[in-house]
Amino acid sequence: MSTVAAMQDQQPESGHHHEYRLFPAAAVIAVGVIFLMSNLGVKIPFLDNSNWWAWLILIAALQPLARAYEVFRERGKVDAQAVYSLLVAAAIILVAAMFLLGLDWQVWWPLFVILGGLFTLVRKPCRSRYWHRRHRGYGDAGDATFRH
């Protein structure tokens, strides 16, 4: 087998896997550009805030948002797996907002309890071998489902 044929066999069939990595990569590049501009003397208003580092927390929200979008594009609907990814992003955004807006944790902590309740409504696919052996016949283990 030629080298080109071997490389073609190893490449994914669709290009959407590269799109999925584009969002986090662009965010990291943007952060680097912002810090470089700041080091070069360009005035960036949100870096003057004492909680500027909380903006970095928002970068972590890009991955689950991109995952939710990818699931939606693949399946054409918002299913439990997409909702789970959106809830993860919401939790990350909530933490960042608490720091950026200077919100009082003693007042707003019930929002995390509410998110926890929403998480219990959505089941993320379990990938452990033990789980698969115990739950054979309960549908496709790769699908997320709503709990009844």
Image (cartoon, rainbow, N blue to C red):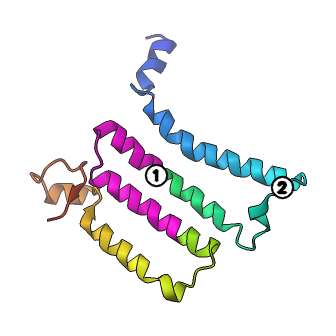
Q: Position of residue 52 (x, y in %)?
A: 71, 67
What range of the chain is rendered magenta?
65-94
Q: Residue at the spot x=40%, y=27% of the render?
A: 14
User: Which circle's residue, 2 or 1, is located before the other in the chain?
Assistant: 2
Q: What's the amino acid at mark 2?
A: Ser
Residue 8 location, x and y as percent? 45, 18
Q: Is residue 90 left or right of residue 117?
A: right
Dot 2 corresponds to which residue? 38
Q: Amino acid at mark 1?
A: Leu
Q: Which mark is residue 65?
A: 1
Q: Quadrant of residue 101?
A: bottom right
Report the disc number at residue 101: none
Crowd tier of the residue under label 1, counting other residues whose Cα lies within 10 Å: few below 14, some 14–19, many 20 or above:
many
Which quadrant does the N terminus fall into?
A: top left
Q: Quadrant of residue 104?
A: bottom right
Residue sitting at the far bottom? 106
Q: What residue is shown at x 52% (from left), y 65% (from top)?
A: 93
Please indicate whether residue 129 sits to the left or right of residue 97 in the image: left
Q: Quadrant of the C terminus?
A: bottom left
Q: What secondary structure is found at the residue carrying circle 2? A: helix
What type of secondary structure mainly makes up the magenta span?
Answer: helix
Nearest the eye: 17 or 85: 85
Which residue is at the front of the view, 40 or 129? 40
